[in-house]
Image: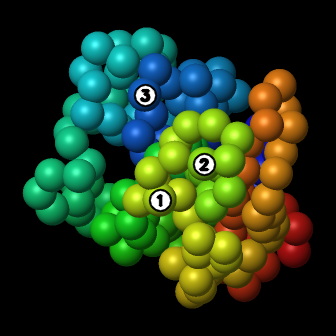
Amino acid sequence: MRFAPLLPAGAHVLDVAAGHGRNARWLAQAGFHVTAIDRDEQALGACGAARTVCVDLEAGPPPLAGQRFDAVVVMNYLHRPLFAAISGWLAPHGILIYETFAKGQELVGRPTNPDFLLQRGELLRAFAGLTVVAFEDGIVNEGQTRVVQRLCASADSMPKALG
């Protein structure tokens, strides 16, 4: 919600690993055209007005080849081999909004597997070709204590809403 003002009215948004569609539903209700992608067909059924694509993001080549979106949203999901595809899904003016668990989370809760925890500054390195709008790396207390990284970045040198 915090970065939605950066998106143009009617923007096309990709919700990666959408699950039950909490973000997809909110984005669709806010007037955006949403594509929700996840491997769980039953969960995608809860995505409301979003277009859904059921595919295992961790098996085979990345889906949606050649498609571009005004924004790509990734929440609580980490599969490093998808970083290049995520960048590729961004339209030239696109906005990336990415949040997931980081090193230190294993001390306060799940996940604890280091394969599912970002290293310090990893999102900055993974998306170094984008212009950082905001970046956070550390402990958040929003109902529960979590250790996360949050990145909002633009494929433009200055997002239109800020420029």
Q: Residues within 10 Å of mark 2 (few under 14, many from 20)?
A: some
User: In the rendered image, which quarter contains the N terminus?
Assistant: top right
Relative image position of residue 22 (x, y in whole percent): 58, 24
The reply, left or right, for residue 90 in relation to residue 133 is left
Q: Please indicate, yes or no, whether residue 43 appears anywhere in the rendered image.
A: yes
Indicate which disc residue 19 carries: 3
State the residue at coordinates (53%, 58%). Answer: 117
Q: Please indicate, yes or no, whether residue 154 appears anywhere in the rendered image.
A: no
Q: Earlier in the sequence, mark 2 or mark 3?
A: 3
Return the residue found at the far left: 60
Q: Which residue is mark 2?
A: 106
Q: Residues within 10 Å of mark 1 (few under 14, many from 20)?
A: some
Indicate which disc residue 26 carries: none
Q: Earlier in the sequence, mark 2 or mark 1?
A: 2
Instruction: From the image, state whether disc 1 or disc 3 is nearer to you.
Output: 1
User: In the rendered image, which quarter contains the C terminus?
Assistant: bottom right
State the residue at coordinates (33%, 29%). Answer: 52
Q: Which residue is mark 1?
A: 114
Q: Height in image: 118 above or below 5?
A: below
Spatial CA distance of label 1 from label 3 is: 22 Å
